[in-house]
Image: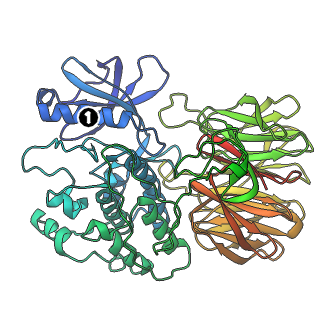
Amino acid sequence: MTVSTGAVIGGYRIERVLGTGGMGSVYLAAHPTLPRFDALKVLQPQLSSDPEYRARFIREANIVAGLTHPNIVSVYDRGEDQGYLWIAMQYVEGVDAGTLLAQDPQSIPPQRALHIIGEIGKGLDYAHQHGLLHRDVKPSNFLLSSRDWRQVLLSDFGIAKSAADATELTRTGGLVATLAYASPEQLRGQAVDHRSDIYSLACSLYKLLTGQNPYPATEAAQVMHAHLYSPPPRVTVPCPHLPPALDEILAIALAKHPADRFVSCHELVSAVGHALEGPTAPVQHYAPPIPTMPAVGPVPPAFGTGVGPNRRRRKTIAITAAAGVAVAAVAAAGFVIANRDTAAGGKTGQAITEIPVGSAMDGTMDADPSTHSLYLANPSSNSVTVIDMTSNKVTATIPVGENPRGVAVDSVNRTVYVVNSGSNSGSTTNAASTVSIIDTSTNKVTATVPTGKSSWNVAVDTKTHLVYVVDITDPAIAPNDMSSDVSVIDPATKTVVATIPHVGFQSEDVAVDPTTGMAYVTSFSDGSVKVVDTTSRAVVSSIQPGGMPGRIALDPSSHTAYVTSGSGLAVVDTITNTRSTIIPADCRLHGVTVDPGHAVYAACTSEGVVVIDPNTRTIRETLSVPSDVGIAADPGSHILYVYGGGYVSAIKR
């Protein structure tokens, strides 16, 4: 039974059906008071009186309401109206990975599969750290946003449970899982912990890579028998082009005994990332010490990567009398309480000040040495945060367009350019991509320039002062157009004066070398960096950095570009436009910045900054601080600024 369009449930007006399952339906619904759409899950009326289904439905709302993570669908409210139990949730405009595979089993390339399980793995690790298990991890619960191709969320905690909860919300003999992705211990009816979800995530990875279930039998009994007794499937059998190291990784992740598996989703994803993007060394099997799921409290999070016994853990900052600083250390977090200075990463002479800025995940930053100001894009609040680099305090918050991502400073013209990618999922405004132009003397927006399809990042040519904006296109939005363009803005007229078409595919970042007149655009989907002549406005070369390029930073003084490429940093000679070397890291790199003549800094996806010597091109150390894509260095003071976990860490080295 479905609810008709226009009906009102719990104050929400039903717009249309998004999906229907065994327990009920999910509707696109207009929020009672806010200008947005939510997803409204409504339990079938005949099931609302069933104690089991009612308890399971309410439990999902209660469980997910306690989770706040960008990779987990948020629950806003729940209630009962006209005999309907309902849950109001975050609406993600797009498609689930299961539907995408049903339409075309080969529709997800390996790097996209890696990105999907990486994002889902973050959400799962977060849930596990809060003592919760999902228990039904599968591609149809992976929501892929069509507004932002990088946004992936985990849904349907309807059969989730606390690790310490012995209550079973299922009929006697019933299976709480989807058979194709169920762990052996689930099938045996044994106690399960977070490693069961890791097994299911590995099964989902197999499906994303091959388009097939890991054990594709037609009878349920055969599938169960295979999960329990058959060797883990080899991904290179249906897909011989994939690296053999993936077979070894899946053999660990799909081990029959939980003690033989990876200890976290992060470790699984890191190993897969190394296989697909980094050096393909044989995987060394190591049975890690398994944390016991406590009655109260989280699973200890694992830090670092690697499958061998040398895996690193997050460090607790030591509090010593010799430090002379009163700080509070957070166990296994590696950072200090905001606005207190201490030694970082166990090395003296590295003072950290944490500046609270709110959630700015995926927002970049840039420093303006002339005004001693740092500008950070804050997508969650549609604003730019301004930090005084002298006092390390927030001095202004500038409203800009929707979903700001990229930031570039032109110190000479006293201008900041901010790329606003446009509407987020669930928004009713349908905002297009724009560039906000900010006067740094007043910190006010002086103009807003419409740009391309889905603008993502921006760079300034410090010689001509022209502005280059890269557009990224999601195939879910335009399935026949995966190409990226570059829009050129003239600061004098504050208009787009040219569009350079077909500069890569799903391009993420752009940088301009004023000494050569070349622009460099990272093309994620085809694994290249496109070189654009800014005079002829044409692609003149294509560089293969190795892996899938993401962010780029230039050092014009040494004619060098640094490109994040999975778990490595590619070094590119901008005179010959060839890759010189690739510096391997033990984490997936998300952001990069250069302090010319001093250091190169590459930020890991969740914690850690790799410090690289630009002369020897070797890693000096890894700083243990929360991190994301936002990273910048002040070339005057040599202070490094890193965004992570709601704070900007100012690190004086």
Snapshot colouring = rainbow
Q: Secondary structure at mark 1?
A: helix
Quarter of the picture holding the C terminus: bottom right
Residue 256, x across and y down, in percent: 24, 70
Visible residue check, residue 554: yes
Q: Residue furthest front?
A: 321
Label 1 crowd (10 A; few <14 / some 14-19 / many >=20)? some
Tell me if residue 628 comes above or below residue 3 in the rendering.
below
Q: Residue furthest left?
A: 172
In terms of depth relative to the viewer, which is nearer, 561 or 543?
561
Q: Is residue 91 left or right of residue 27?
A: right
Count of numbered circles in the view: 1
Residue 114, x across and y down, in percent: 46, 63
In terms of depth relative to the viewer, which is nearer, 133 or 293?
293
In terms of depth relative to the viewer, which is nearer, 117 or 600?
600
Q: Residue at x 86, y 41 (%)?
A: 372
Q: Is residue 396 left or right of residue 140?
A: right
Tell me if residue 501 comes above or below residue 612 in the rendering.
above
Tell me if residue 245 comes above or below residue 447 in the rendering.
below
Q: Residue at x 12, y 69 (%)?
A: 222
Q: Residue at x 55, y 46 (%)?
A: 330
Quarter of the picture holding the N terminus: top left
Residue 57, x across and y down, in percent: 23, 34
Where on the picture, by quarter, is residue 325? top right
Visible residue check, residue 405: no
Where on the picture, by quarter, is residue 509? bottom right
Residue 504, x across and y down, in percent: 64, 62
Q: Is residue 554 left or right of residue 276?
A: right
Residue highlighted by disc 1:
59
Query: What amino acid is found at the position of numbered circle 1 in the picture?
Result: Arg
Q: Residue at x 45, y 55 (%)?
A: 301
